[in-house]
Image (cartoon, grey):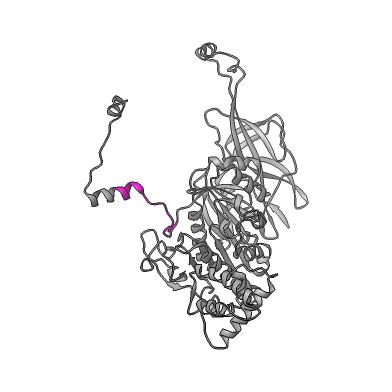
Amino acid sequence: MLVAYAQPSGLKQVGRIVEEARPESFVFVTSKRDYPPKYEYVVVRSVEPVGGEEREVLVLCQVRGVLSRSSAYSSRLDLDALERLYQAGIDDANLLCVARTLGFLAEEDGREVVLMPRRTFPPGTPVYLAPDELVRGFFSYPPDEGLYIGTLVSRRSVPVYLSVNGFRRHVAVIAQTGAGKSYTVGVILEELMRLGATAVVIDPHADYVFLSRDREMRRHQYSDRVVIFRNPSSSGRYDPSQLDNVVELTVKFSELSPEAVAEIAEIPERWVNIRKVIRAAIEELRSKGDYELEDLLEELKRRSRQGKEAQYAERAYNHLVRLRRFKVFGRATTPVDGVILRPGQVSVLDLSGLNDASQDYIVSWVLEEVFRLRSAGQFPWPVFVVVEEAHRFVPARSQERRTMSSSIIRTIAAEGRKFGVFLILVTQRPSRIDPDALSQCNSQIILRITNPHDQRAVAEASERLGAELMDDLPGLNVGEAVIVGELTRVPVVVKVRRRVTREGGADIDLVEELRKARERLNLAPHRYSASSLLSDV
């Protein structure tokens, strides 16, 4: 059964619809002194078919533009003529608002749904300021179904929640550097911790290593569920003594299959003889016990001096010697099942201080295991995978750079939702990310973007981001985001809430750091006056 919600009384009128109107949009004239600003919400009464009968409903709309129009103050007049009009007290300006229809709330089989109107609004129809309680209905969910992301930009009194089920179709968080994307992801992770979610965070710059601490560096109620995984070879951003719950992240080289070794070394499958000699060398070493990379290189060097396979052994050696760049091999492999992947745990893979090849291999290895465990039913809980700097791990195929991790990320993007592995791709360069992976993210959280190439990539990836919302992206302030897709009932512009946990990747305060440097060097800043500088010109 489908019913429409009752209408609140005491609505404040702010205008009337004029000229041409459609079910999707309309223009209304408003007061010059008290008009609704851009992004504000208004409502219009309409009669719509609901549950098989006609009902009067309140249709929620958003002001998408505000403009003022005058026939007297024309660009054809010079300044003197305009001044005479002004002195004569002539004021024929009309203030117009362009509104976009968002829909009306109804209840269908016990759940709230948003329906779009099927009828247009006649010119002259009054427009009212939307009451808070109605607006809240569009952006609220029960506590166990919603993630509190922030408040409406136009109404800070109205909280905005994201649908947990919206994450089933993957999410992209996109913004230029400094716009607040990692901060926003931190808010999402706080909410996922509150709901007991299992998450794996790919963290190339140590942006999330303080999730176990609040802003004052105190431990919070979820601290024990945040574990930092770090390779001993990392010269990371923070010393391990500054972090909580640090676990070594290593791979035992002798546990890699011959095929995996060849794949890491980027040896094509068609190079059958080279792969064959690698397999033979590894089988020889396994017959003697444990071995490391240097042992395999020594065995290949030995084989390059004798027999029919000498030339293939030499070529294999030349390829595998590159694996010395991978600073991840240790005496034991950190188990994914039961250590990295545990129910309700947020596992942060701190990759800071590792080279690109090492980071790429770790991401490939861990995500392959996560997907295998979930698809085989060996880990019973859904897993959220956050990939920060996603354009580095799953670049566009047009890029010259090839990564090991791109294949598994594309697989999760295409098939992960069937097995309960949900991606959150985070990037400041959407134009450099694989468009197929990005387009699989049915929801986008988009902060400030000014680069035209990146704007175009976002527009191509999102079917729900209209031209109007695209035009808003350069004008967003830090911490403001456009959210579209299945995370929310209707597109929304939010001010991201303040984080509870400490941010790891915040920019340093240069003023404060230079002040400390002057104190240590016993220097006093010299002040120049503008007049003294100009006198020298």
In the image shown, does 403 or 229 lie closer to the viewer?
403
Q: Residue 412 occupies which quadrant of the picture?
A: bottom right
Secondary structure mostly taken by the magenta-highlighted segment of the chain: loop
Residue 69: % across, % down: 60, 24
Residue 54: % across, % down: 76, 46
Quarter of the image that includes the C terminus: top left
- Horizontal placement of 321 versus 460: left or right? left
97, above or below 338, in the image? above
381, above or below 79, in the image? below
**Total count of labels:** 0
In the image shown, does 45 or 298 lie closer to the viewer?
298
Of all residues, the one furthest to the bottom in this rendering is 288
Residue 25: % across, % down: 68, 38
In the image shown, does 138 or 342 lie closer to the viewer?
342
User: Over which residues does the magenta segment extend?
Assistant: 499-514
Of all residues, the one furthest to the right in this rendering is 52
Quarter of the image that includes the N terminus: bottom right
Of all residues, the one furthest to the front in this rendering is 306
Say whether residue 208 is visible.
yes
Q: Residue 28 occupies which quadrant of the picture?
A: top right
182, above or below 33, in the image? below
Q: Is residue 506 magenta?
A: yes
Say whether residue 197 is visible.
no
Residue drawn at x 58%, y 62% as measured from the top left: 145
- Horizontal placement of 209 versus 56: left or right? left
